[in-house]
Amino acid sequence: MNTIKKAKRRQGSKGQAIIFIILVLSCLVFVVFWNYDLHRILHVKGIAQNAGDASAVMAARWQGISLNLMGDLNLMHALALVSDNQAAAETITNIQARLSYTGPMVAFMGSQQAAKQNRLFNQDDFTAYLKRHAQRVRFDYPHTTGSDGEPLFPEPYPNAWEEYASMLDALANDGIAAGPDNMRLYSDYSGGHILLNKAFYDAIAGRNWCWFYHNAPGLLELYQNFHPAWWPPLPPIENVPYINSEFFGLGMVKVTTSLDNLVTTETINTVTDRRTLQYQFTPEDLTNSATWYAYGGHLWSEWEAMSMQGDFPMPLAGPVKQEYDYAGADAAIRVRTRATRLTPGAGSRAITNTINWTAAAKPFGYLPGPQRPDAFDLVLPAFHQARLIPVDSLSGAGSGGYDLEWREHIEEHLPEYMEHGPLGHGCRFCRMLEIWENVDFRQTGVNWLEINSQQCVIVPPGPGGGGRGGRRRAH
Ligand SMILES: [Zn+2]
């Protein structure tokens, strides 16, 4: 009798042991899966970072090379004028006009190669967007007219839009793995508007009433529901002479003046010497008036974003060297990788994580002195290398770069919204505009701010500052 009981007890404890082992094993399996997933995500993130960084540096390197070429051509133009060779001077100016597109296009191509060599794949939506844009350049740019009936996008040289569109098409045909994230499309709106500010949508999504307190005081109270549109009209399309590429543009202007207004005899001679051109300009040589490529436009100024002073100082170990302290042509890249997890999600479905990475780089160099490359207005060969820079210190990035959901919103949805009010399509930003339309939603914000607005303090970012914990994307 006793032995039977003992055997049963043994069997019972054996059963418990098996359940225990199964439990431990399944826990272990999950730990292994989880560990694998973690490493995989880190690995894929590493790929994104390497490839994004390499891609941005490559683009910036070619921007530097293009600027040096542009500078060499300025020197040759000056030499052509000295020997009174008008035909050569004209040819050089024509080449320069083309170089301001072909140079950045090579940068675009180089950035894709660098991304792909670092194991990134083409993104179908990146490619499709560029294809669509090439179509716009080819078919819309030549025919769009402004309110005065004049062409809105006059060509910088004959057949420019056709040639530029073909180069974009060629790039798209190879596939886009790295999106140029600081493009400045000619069709972008000029100036600011609250609907063109991504932070407005973020504030709605996060019920961040303090954002309204700081950036749009009164908006919550004043806004009246749609029909007719309460908003001021969207700003017009910027109308500037189009001589720079939309992607990786060099930020140049064409100036018609005598050369001594743009550079000193001493500097041009030192640079000419270094390029072994074997000619010394006299002050009289520089009095000929002609059209020169100079630094200007939106770019080329003090590098304010890297300043260690002001309201939001950049947390740097020391100030930027004087000769490098300029904001100018630079390149930003957006890449994306995906990691599929082994650990199943809800309903045993596989989970895929998308990893986005943005990187920025800039050509650096100096003129003899050393002085900033743009110490004089004239573009001269002065660039020596390309380096990564913090994404936050980029020159004024356009409206959302290669964030395609945002681009679709501002390019396609907003004009429609301004006419018809909130639209029912699934776009994340349009959904925020629907929430915004809700009177109760806005009233909640008004009520909260009435009581809590003293909580809306801006804590300076930076080490030890707490608060916002420094710049969100500075890396
Ligand atoms: Zn939208």
Image (spheres, rainbow, N blue to C red):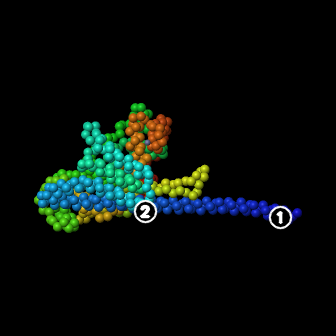
Q: Residue 314 at what x, y percent from top left? A: 37, 57
Q: Residue 227 at what x, y percent from top left? A: 42, 32
- Quarter of the render that holds ligand 1: top left
Please report contact status of discs 1 and 2: CB closer than 8 Å, yes or no: no
Dot 2: element:
loop
Q: Residue 296 at what x, y percent from top left? A: 26, 52
Amino acid type, mark 1: Lys
Image quadrant containing the C terminus: bottom left
Asked if residue 370 lies left or right of residue 82, the reply is right
Quick check: 312 above or below 143? Answer: below
Q: Is residue 453 visible from the viewing direction of this image?
A: no
Kindly identify the residue that appears in the image at 49 percent across and 62 percent down: 43
Task: Name the residue carrying label 2.
Answer: 118
State how far apart marks 1 and 2 are (Cα). Answer: 66 Å
Q: Residue furthest right?
A: 1
Q: Residue 452 at what x, y percent from top left? A: 47, 43
For residue 6, which numbered disc appears in the image? Answer: 1
Label 2 crowd (10 A; few <14 / some 14-19 / many >=20): some
Dot 1: element:
helix
Asked if residue 282 lies left or right of residue 118, the reply is left
